[in-house]
Image: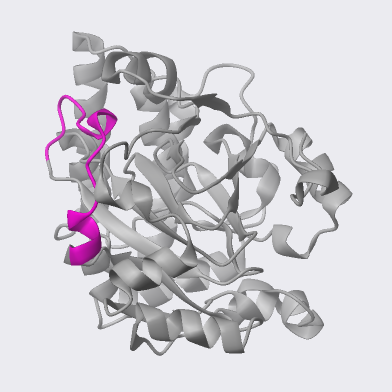
Amino acid sequence: MSGSKSGLPDILDNVRRVTSIQPEEFIENHLLSQQPVIITDTQAGAEISAVTTQEAVVKAFGDVVIQVQRNYTSPLSRNAAEARRQGLSQKVRNRIEEMRLEEYLAHVDADPQTDLLCVEYRTPERIHDALRVPDVCALPGAAEDLVSFTFVANRGNYAHLHFDGDFREVLLYQVFGRKRVVMVPLAAQEKISPSMNFSKVLLQNMAAEEKLDLLRYLGAYDCVISPGEAVYFPASIWHYVEYLDTGMSVNFRFGRDDFARKVVDANRVPFYPELHQLLSLLKEVPETPERAGLQDKIWTEISSTLRQEHTDSRARHRATQEMYRRLVADLLAPGELPRQVATDCPVAEQMAVERHDAPSKRWREELMLGDPL
């Protein structure tokens, strides 16, 4: 466990750290078992391996344009007590601005408490060209290309506990600064009060010991990554991130297999926790005729439900949600954690309805999702 002597918060420090790893070992020991790992030499010899400080980033990439916006859950944090009581219904609809990277970092220096940040911005070509794609990112059976996003934020900023809706495996490379990364397995999601792909548990507002106690209860992974290190996120694992310093990261989002891509992209709103739990459970089934038959059965039910006509988006959401819950219940082994909350969250329902009804599909384009059914 790290502590104050190192200038870091107390953490569980329970993620395996390796210098390098062969793709075969990575697949066997981490991807198939959905176990995070930190790899420390993924960019050895690449231009970006020498860019490990804010000053070096400004010199190398200062004139690169990035997009910044307010942290969309900032009303839930810090001293916003009233917003915390209201929960995720306070989610902010953000205005996006363009700034040069050096301008944003100067803004952070002038206003260290800013809640502006760059999040999930397609990695600019200049930065992408300075990287090498790690060998572990090339998965056999991938039916689409890898994509990359960039993140930049100030010390004290964070990413609220959530999972990503595209069901891609992710490798996050830390360019400069340090990040605390927490991951909660999908098997524990009933313990964190999911509201679509957001949790109503506000880790960012917890005291240090309270946070550690909760992470132990959840069976969470908890680590700090430093410049030059990369951490693997299993597909759709719940995660929370703290910026311990002003910092910048770049991720590699692996190509999905054909079935995962087809199932996720078919959904108008691909953020149902049980959808991602279903795909995660399916990964544990060996590549056999039994798995092929199971996939056919799942696809038949999913495509039938998603093509049905409904009176409105609320009815569509409820039918879709119940379908995924039923499929998961059919696949779960005896003894798995049952649903802990019998009453559905109205905030989650409203978030789903808004996604269904929103005229803009920009978020689908940003996630590189295909056309839904």
The image quadrant where one finds the N terminus is: top right
Q: In the drawing, does residue 314 fall left or right of residue 259? A: right
| First to last magenta residue range | 126-143
Q: Is residue 47 above or below residue 33?
A: below
Q: Residue at x 71, y 74 (%)?
A: 77
Front-most of 301 and 139? 139
Q: Residue 365: x percent and y percent? A: 21, 67
Q: Is residue 217 above or below residue 264?
A: above
Q: In the drawing, does residue 372 fall left or right of residue 210? A: left
Q: In the drawing, does residue 53 fall left or right of residue 98? A: right
Q: Residue 120: x percent and y percent? A: 36, 65
Would you say the magenta stretch is mainly helix, strand or loop? loop
Front-most of 110 and 222? 110
Q: Is residue 252 above or below residue 330?
A: below
Q: Is residue 85 above or below residue 272?
A: below
Residue 128 belongs to the span the image colors magenta: yes
Q: In the drawing, does residue 126 fall left or right of residue 186? A: left
Q: Residue at x 22, y 43 (%)?
A: 132
User: Which image quadrant for residue 338?
Assistant: top right
Q: Residue 293: x percent and y percent? A: 21, 18
Is residue 281 at all visible to an observer of this figure?
yes
